[in-house]
Image (spheres, grey):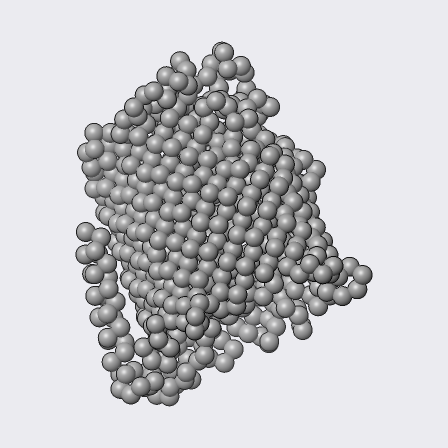
């Protein structure tokens, strides 16, 4: 079955390539003859970055494009920023990004629960190397920052290029890949909560340089502030690039990881809007084991100087084994329950595209067309919660409780038109989605969805430093999982209607004269219909689920300001501000016109790292940052509020090369310096922020 799907897509890609290249291959190196042919040199890097500033990439258009010319807000967390801040999770890595909310559920390292412009993006908005990374209900693919080359955030609907994805945007993780310049690093890290970690990263050419490799790994043994909640990890990620010919390159990307984290991250809530200091988990029954692997390839072949064929393919699996518990009363003796949940998920994704450069009169075109296919499924095993003991719960052979398989096929076309100072984006895509939902008896219910998504964007360069942009874009997302309208509703547990969103956005991108910088400002208005919002309920309801999906119509309006800077005085910096008005236009009873919970109106951040290259401080690096999360509502009924939150982070490094020990570097990072452990509440359930953490790393680079 899998082989036949690959063969089908390869055949379709070949057919598309033949049609596009027929006239182009009239002679070697010739392009389309549509008037006057113009050949444009484009970078073959997935993302070009310099310090904290991303310069160009394929993240928004699937073709190499200068970010200042893209009529859409884009944030990029670069390799240098990741190294300076040493984030432990993807949420940590996005903590200084405008429009991204990462504190909705307090400390919970189990899931990358990211919100973009107020909309959840963790089920439909996570991509890796431009391929969809589908998460099951609990079998989520874990993302480890040491394996990242960068993280790009596309703000607002991006379905016209990436298919099924949410109204708030997408997060695309760029994996570390082989380099021609040799680099080798071994790093030892120690920190609070018994943190011990070994990391390594090796890359470089082999032989004549046509073959290059990369091998990245992490081995971590660590506790957390929560009793019995581990943070252990073993991960290895090999990658190989081979230049088959001067025009053909193949890159293989793989990863295997096994982690153990806590199964329960919550605190006992004695009343609405209050998280006590009593941890709800049972330390002796609290392991969340996650085993995952992925393997894929990227092929790029230049048919001519103006026609390029690309195919990206990946297969991945995640096996989750979750032990959890909770409290019904302030002491375990008065009311504790336990649960054991198992889930297996797998995803196959492939994208095949053709890129062509040509001109029509005074217009320069970059045309990208392609097919995108994915097949994602999960199976869950869960028999409900137990009330006698952890041992009795663990002894139960968990029965099959349901599952789902989703097949998606999308056809897309993008025309990027440039004339003088104007750049116009015209993108369109049509998706067909087949979903089969299985109940506990393994009886399947089929559902078909299809829809169009598009984007019209315009960018105008007023001068070499300032560009104005505007866009109108849409999103299309068939609902994954089941929607519960309420315990007494006749169609409770039904498949939901597709979620659709439309965005209007205007803004500007500005580079400070004679600097390496990028400042982006935007105003946006997003209207979403038939979205789903998770609500926490009693675990004895809805067949034992502790969260359910409720259909919502939402409207997100706001302002974002963000800037990245590399100054000549050896200072690099990133700053961000977001204003967000997230209104519920249809939702649970009594919520119409309210603000969505855990959605602050104001957030702001500033991070700077100073690393002098001369003078008495040469070799030292000093970093500090401030993060502000404003007040928000704790539930959708808007009956109580979350207080605002302040965080401070520090970094200090020293390069022992100044003392003759070339390649030896010490770095200390402290997150949440003032040990803020305040509560934050979402959908009426309250959590606590992780307190102060500190790590000290010694790296040897050779």
* Residue 75, quarter of picture: bottom right
Q: Quadrant of the C terminus?
A: bottom right
| Marker count (numbered) | 0
Q: Nearer the viewer, residue 617 or 161?
A: 617
- Where does the image place residue 612, in percent across and percent down from the top left? 73, 62
Residue that protrudes farthest toward the top in the picture = 334
Please name the residue shown 24% across and 75% down the image.
18
Q: Is residue 393 left or right of residue 596?
A: left
| Residue 191 position in % (x across, y down) | 63, 39
Judge by depth and name the residue closer to the eye, 68 or 491: 68
Determine which quarter of the picture holds residue 195: top right
Q: Note whether 571 is above or below 207 in the view shown.
A: above
Q: Is residue 675 visible?
A: yes
**Residue that appears at 79% across and 64% down:** 615
List x then y, in percent, for residue 389. 41, 15
* Left or right for 472, reference 686: left
Residue at coordinates 56% horizontally, 29% vertically from top-left? 226
Residue 431 seen in render: no
Residue 241: name its quadrant.
bottom left
Residue at x 63% of width, y 32% of height:
678
From this view, report whether residue 478 is shown above or below residue 440. Answer: below
Nearest to the observer: residue 131 or residue 319: 319
Give the x, y percent position of residue 37: 37, 86
């Amino acid at each position: 079955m899998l082989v036949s799907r690959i063969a089908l897509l390869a055949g379709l890609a070949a057919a598309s390539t033949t049609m596009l290249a027929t006239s182009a291959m009239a002679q070697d190196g010739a392009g389309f003859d549509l008037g006057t042919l113009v050949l444009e040199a484009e970078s073959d890097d997935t993302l070009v970055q310099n310090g904290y500033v991303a310069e160009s990439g394929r993240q928004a258009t699937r073709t190499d494009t200068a970010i200042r010319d893209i009529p859409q807000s884009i944030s990029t967390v670069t390799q240098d920023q990741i190294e300076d801040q040493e984030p432990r999770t993807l949420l940590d890595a996005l903590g200084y990004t405008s429009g991204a909310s990462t504190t909705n559920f307090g400390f919970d390292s189990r899931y990358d629960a990211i919100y973009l412009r107020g909309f959840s993006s963790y089920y439909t908005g996570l991509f890796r190397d431009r391929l969809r990374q589908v998460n099951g209900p609990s079998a989520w693919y874990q993302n480890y920052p040491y394996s990242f080359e960068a993280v790009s955030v596309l703000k607002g609907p991006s379905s016209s290029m990436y298919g099924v994805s949410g109204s708030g945007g997408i997060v695309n993780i760029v994996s570390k890949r082989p380099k021609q310049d040799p680099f080798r690093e071994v790093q030892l890290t120690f920190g609070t909560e018994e943190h011990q970690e070994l990391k390594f990263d090796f890359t470089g050419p082999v032989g004549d340089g046509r073959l290059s490799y990369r091998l990245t790994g992490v081995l971590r043994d660590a506790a957390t502030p929560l009793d019995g909640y581990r943070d252990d990890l073993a991960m290895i990620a090999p990658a190989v690039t081979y230049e088959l010919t001067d025009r053909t390159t193949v890159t293989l990307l793989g990863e295997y990881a096994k982690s153990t984290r806590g199964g329960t991250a919550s605190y006992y809530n004695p009343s609405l809007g209050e998280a006590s200091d009593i941890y709800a988990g049972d330390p002796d029954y609290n392991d969340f084991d996650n085993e995952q692997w992925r393997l894929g390839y990227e092929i790029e072949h230049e048919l001519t100087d103006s026609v390029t064929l690309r195919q990206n393919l990946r297969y991945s699996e995640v096996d989750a084994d979750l032990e959890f518990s909770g409290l019904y009363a302030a002491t375990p003796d008065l009311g504790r329950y336990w649960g054991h949940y198992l889930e297996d998920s797998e995803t196959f994704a492939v994208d095949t595209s053709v890129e062509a450069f040509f001109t029509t009169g005074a217009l320069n075109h970059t045309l990208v067309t392609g097919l995108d296919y994915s097949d994602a499924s999960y199976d869950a095993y869960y028999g409900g919660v137990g009330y006698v003991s952890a041992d009795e719960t663990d002894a139960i052979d968990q029965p099959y409780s349901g599952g789902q398989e989703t097949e998606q096929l999308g056809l897309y076309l993008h025309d990027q038109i440039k004339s003088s100072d104007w750049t116009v984006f015209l993108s369109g895509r049509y998706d067909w989605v087949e979903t089969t939902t299985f109940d506990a008896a393994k009886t399947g219910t089929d559902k078909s969805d299809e829809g169009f998504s598009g984007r019209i964007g315009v960018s105008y360069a007023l001068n070499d430093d300032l560009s104005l942009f505007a866009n109108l874009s849409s999103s299309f997302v068939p609902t994954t999982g089941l929607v519960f309208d309420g315990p007494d509703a006749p169609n409770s547990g039904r498949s939901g209607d597709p979620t659709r969103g439309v965005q209007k956005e205007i803004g500007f991108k500005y580079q400070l004269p004679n600097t390496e910088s990028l400042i982006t400002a935007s105003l946006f208005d997003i209207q979403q219909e038939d979205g789903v919002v998770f609500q926490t309920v009693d675990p004895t309801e809805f067949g034992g689920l502790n969260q359910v999906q409720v259909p919502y119509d939402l409207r997100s309006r706001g302002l974002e300001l963000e800037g990245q800077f590399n100054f000549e005085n050896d200072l690099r910096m990133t700053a961000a501000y977001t204003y967000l008005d997230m209104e519920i236009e249809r939702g649970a009873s009594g919520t119409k016109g309210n603000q969505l919970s855990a959605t602050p109106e104001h957030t702001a951040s500033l991070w700077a790292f100073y690393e002098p290259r001369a003078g008495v401080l040469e070799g030292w690096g000093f970093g500090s940052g401030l993060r502000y999360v404003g007040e928000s509502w704790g539930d959708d009924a808007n009956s109580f509020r979350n207080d605002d939150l302040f965080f401070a982070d520090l970094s200090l490094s020293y390069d022992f090369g100044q003392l003759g020990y070339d390649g030896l570097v010490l770095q200390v990072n402290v997150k949440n310096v003032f040990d803020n452990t305040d509560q934050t509440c979402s959908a009426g359930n309250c959590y606590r922020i992780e307190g102060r953490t500190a790590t000290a790393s010694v790296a040897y680079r050779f």
